[in-house]
């Protein structure tokens, strides 16, 4: 039996499945996303626009539904530049990866709209608006974000036209927003396992770096006596503060197929 290399070992130990993500790639509007969890989760109108300048949903009565329902037959328009929506990602974050990071879907004849992003998830720390036209795959680097930076809040301005500035008052029809590069928010510490449970995590695999599954006797569970950053085994028992354990009763606990010529 051959031993897995370090890369394989790392892949084996990363076989947990995030409870928040709905697994399985999906195709939508000409783009492929990791799952439906890649789409925005919440949309609200910003402030109280003057009459005729606010947002108007089409195909549904709800602004939130129009921008989060994975449905190209619903959208929002705006009567003027004051009509804006804050769009939030809750079960995932947009990540600044290589190339475009998220898509704004726009219905019909391509029209211009504004996009701003929040650097810290709050509406008080938004970038300036950048303008895009039609359905666009957008790079977070356009807004000055570093590689690997994450975003959970976008502000969408379907109609950037300002009275008195000249030009035509045409609103874009914004349908949906979805992340091309994303991961679950748990990656930066939402799961502390300090309630006596594994908080919905499950064990899947083991897999190697190519996605090949192997039989194993790994098991997982909540461990009371270990609570990082304290010393392993010394956390007081019964305090409901602990950690998620991945363990085996002995040995490698993996059955690995050896290919002709070895690994």
Image (spheres, rainbow, N blue to C red):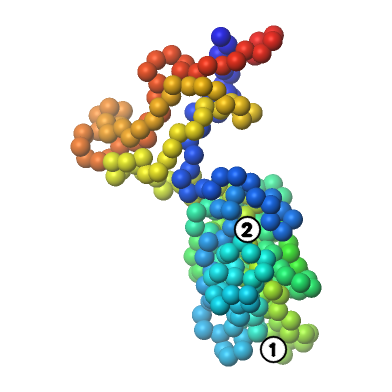
Q: Is residue 223 above or below residue 191?
A: above
From this viewpoint, is residue 120 visible?
A: no
Look at discs 1 and 2 and give the one toward the viewer: 2
Question: Residue 138 versus residue 15: which sits nearer the camera?
Answer: 15
From this viewpoint, is residue 40 visible?
A: yes
Residue 35 in the figure: left or right of residue 160: left
* x and y percentages locating residue 32 in the rendered image: 69, 50
Q: Is residue 133 above or below residue 145?
A: below
* x and y percentages locating residue 113 in the rendered image: 70, 72
Residue 204 in the figure: left or right of residue 57: left
Question: Residue 19 versus residue 124: which sits nearer the camera?
Answer: 19
The residue positioned 49% from the left and 39% from the top of the image is: 17
Q: Is residue 147 above or below residue 75?
A: above
Give the residue at mark 2.
178
* x and y percentages locating residue 67 in the rendered image: 59, 68
The secondary structure type at the circle numbered 1 is loop
Question: Residue 154 versus residue 66: which sits nearer the camera?
Answer: 66
Quarter holding residue 241: top left
Give the residue at mark 1.
163
- Give the tally of numbered discs: 2
Dividing the image into 4 quarters, which one contains the N terminus?
A: top right
The secondary structure type at the circle numbered 2 is strand
């Amino acid at each position: 039996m051959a031993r897995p290399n370090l890369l394989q070992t790392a892949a084996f130990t990363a076989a947990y499945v995030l409870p928040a993500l709905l697994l399985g790639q999906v195709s939508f509007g000409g783009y492929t996303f990791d799952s439906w969890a890649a789409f925005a989760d919440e949309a609200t109108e910003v402030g109280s626009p003057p009459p005729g300048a606010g947002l108007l949903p089409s195909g549904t009565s709800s602004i939130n539904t129009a921008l989060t329902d994975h449905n190209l037959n619903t959208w929002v328009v705006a009567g003027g530049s004051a009509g804006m929506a804050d769009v939030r990602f809750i079960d995932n974050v947009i990540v600044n990866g290589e190339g475009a990071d998220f898509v704004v879907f726009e219905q019909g004849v391509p029209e211009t709209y504004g996009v701003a992003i929040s650097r810290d998830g709050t509406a008080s720390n938004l970038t300036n608006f950048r303008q895009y036209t039609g359905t666009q795959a957008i790079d977070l680097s356009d807004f000055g974000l570093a590689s690997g930076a994450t975003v959970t809040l976008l502000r969408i301005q379907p109609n950037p036209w300002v009275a008195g500035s000249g030009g035509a008052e045409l609103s874009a029809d914004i349908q949906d927003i979805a992340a091309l590069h994303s991961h679950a928010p748990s990656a930066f510490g939402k799961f502390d396992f300090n309630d006596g449970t594994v908080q919905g995590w499950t064990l899947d695999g083991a897999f190697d770096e190519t996605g090949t599954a192997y039989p194993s006797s790994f098991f997982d569970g909540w461990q009371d006596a270990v609570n990082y950053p304290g010393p392993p085994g010394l956390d007081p028992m019964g305090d409901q503060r602990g950690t998620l354990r991945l363990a085996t009763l002995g040995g490698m606990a993996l059955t690995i197929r050896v290919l002709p010529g070895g690994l």
